[in-house]
Amino acid sequence: MLGTGEHGMAEAEFLRIYSKDVALVAPDGRHALTRLQRLAADRLSLQILDGPCLDFRLADAEVELTLEMGRFTFDTVYPALGCDIRSELGSMLGTKVSDDGCIIVDVHQQTSVEGVYAGGDVVRGLDQISNAMGQAGVAATAIRNSLSSKLTQLRQ
Ligand SMILES: Cc1cc2nc3c(=O)[nH]c(=O)nc-3n(C[C@H](O)[C@H](O)[C@H](O)COP(=O)(O)OP(=O)(O)OC[C@H]3O[C@@H](n4cnc5c(N)ncnc54)[C@H](O)[C@@H]3O)c2cc1C
């Protein structure tokens, strides 16, 4: 697990459910872990490796990471680096965003601006493909229904 701090620890703990061999590697330098987090890592037998990560190489069925303290081989590398919420376009259109930058939507994925819908990672919730696709389906249906009712009004 490439990461550190609270987020890195949470992801490493999650992966620990699936494997007894999990290492938490700080990407940029020494780990930013509290004493309690280090105790938790010990309890879970997580390997704590300081960075920076200098290089990586894909081997046959492994990934080789080069750290200052040497070269390490892993079955896979999972990034826990956090995310930047790219909601600038929505903000430019006047949509309301939460304190952390997520676009706020209603149950039909409509934003605070009529006719503007949002879904996926840019709204708050589970950041996974299936969720994004489900929200896209909800938005598409709402858009279709909204256009249909506008058309009916125009015809009356
Ligand atoms: C390393 C990693 C592993 C993951 N593994 C999984 C997994 O195994 N299973 C799973 O379900 N999910 C996984 N996810 C999460 C999944 O990728 C996201 O939840 C999903 O891609 C969200 O889709 P989206 O369309 O909301 O955003 P994105 O897929 O990020 O698409 C947004 C697009 O908008 C573009 N964009 C941004 N700003 C602008 C702009 N101003 N103008 C034009 N274009 C713009 C971006 O370039 C990007 O192409 C993973 C994510 C990461 C980072």
Image (tube, rainbow, N blue to C red):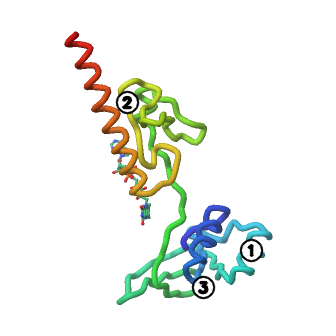
Identify the secondary structure beneath mark 1.
helix
Q: CA distance from mark 1 to mark 2?
A: 44 Å
Depth check: 2 or 121 in front?
121
Quadrant occupied by the N terminus? bottom right
User: Which residue is rendered at x = 40% and y = 27% of the image?
Assistant: 93
Q: What amino acid is found at the position of numbered circle 2 in the picture?
A: Val
Whole-number angstrom distance, CA of label 3 to CA of label 1: 14 Å
Nearer-N-terminus badge (3/1): 3
- Position in image of residue 108 (x %, y %): 42, 35
Q: In the structure shown, which secondary structural element does the residue marked by tag 3 occupy?
A: loop
x 44%, y 79%: residue: 56
Q: Is residue 133 above or below residue 154?
A: below
Mark 2 CB within 8 Å of ligand 1: no
Q: Which residue is mark 3?
A: 20
Among the two numbered marks 2 and 3 on one chain, the one whose residue lies closer to the N terminus: 3
Amino acid at pointer 1: Ala
Q: Residues within 10 Å of mark 1 (few under 14, many from 20)?
A: some
The residue under the point 52% across, 87% down is: 71
Which circle's residue, 1 or 2, is located before the other in the chain?
Answer: 1
At label 3, which amino acid type do we have? Lys
Specify the label residue 116 is tagged with. 2
What mark, if any, has residue 40 been given in the picture? 1
